[in-house]
């Protein structure tokens, strides 16, 4: 909804294109005919990529359009127990061992460890000792522990 009404009966076809271009989905412009001084677009679906802000760019040959760009269009927010991946167009349920907040950032749950920020594998640490810290993007160990899954004592420490 751009907010421009036209008085002329036959003004032509209003065209809307999306910017930046979509990675997937519709690549041709949408068109709408003027009815009672307004253009109504129906069935516009934009498979929005998370992290990208889109706008519709309107053009009407032979007419000046004061407000050519739509308001920002963004992907529907993910829920608190979901996350999204870059270049993705859908929310993903949180994986076991992770804590999700609706963004693209996953952190370790209590006593879980992970090798890198791109890994979706969260490994549970020793349940008796509980050497892994929660809330880290990658594996983080409590003081006195180091290594994969915080499985080694640092020099001078023992469990």
Image (cartoon, rainbow, N blue to C red):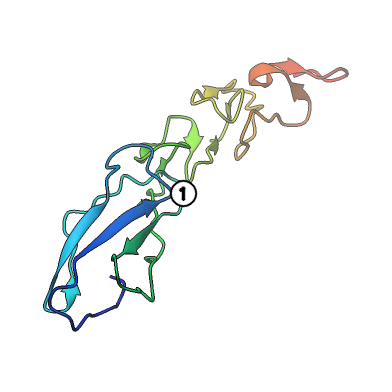
Give x and y (percent) for residue 66. 38, 76
Compare residues 50 and 16 and report the one nearer the observer: 16
Residue receiving disc 1: 52
Quarter of the picture containing the C terminus is top right
- Residue at coordinates 43% horizontally, 45% vertically from top-left? 50
Give the vertical position of 25 relative to 59 (above or below): above
Give x and y (percent) for residue 33. 15, 65
Left or right: where does residue 62 sit relative to residue 141?
left
Give x and y (percent) for residue 91. 36, 41
Give x and y (percent) for residue 92. 37, 36
Give the vertical position of 74 relative to 9 (above or below): above
Left or right: where does residue 132 sit relative to residue 70?
right
Give the vertical position of 7 relative to 62 (above or below): below
In the picture as drawn, the residue positioned furthest to the right comes out as: 156
Compare residues 56 and 158 and report the one nearer the observer: 56
- Residue at coordinates 72% horizontally, 31% vertically from top-left? 142
Q: Tell me the quarter of the picture where residue 8 sits.
A: bottom left
Compare residues 22 and 118 and report the one nearer the observer: 22
- Give the structural element (helix, strand or loop) at label 1: loop
């Amino acid at each position: 909804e751009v907010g421009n009404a036209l008085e002329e009966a036959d003004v032509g076809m209003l065209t809307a294109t999306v910017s930046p271009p979509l990675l997937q989905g519709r690549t041709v412009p949408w068109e709408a005919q003027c009815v009672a001084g307004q253009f109504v677009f129906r069935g516009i679906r934009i498979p929005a990529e998370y992290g990208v802000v889109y706008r519709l760019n309107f053009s009407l040959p032979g007419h000046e359009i004061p407000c050519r760009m739509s308001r920002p269009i963004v992907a529907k927010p993910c829920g608190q127990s979901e996350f999204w991946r870059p270049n993705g167009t859908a929310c993903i349920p949180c994986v076991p061992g992770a804590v999700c907040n609706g963004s693209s950032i996953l952190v370790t749950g209590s006593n879980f460890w992970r090798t890198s920020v791109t890994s979706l594998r969260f490994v549970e640490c020793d349940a008796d000792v509980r050497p892994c810290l929660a809330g880290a993007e990658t594996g983080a160990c409590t003081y006195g522990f180091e290594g994969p899954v915080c499985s080694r004592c640092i020099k001078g420490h023992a469990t």
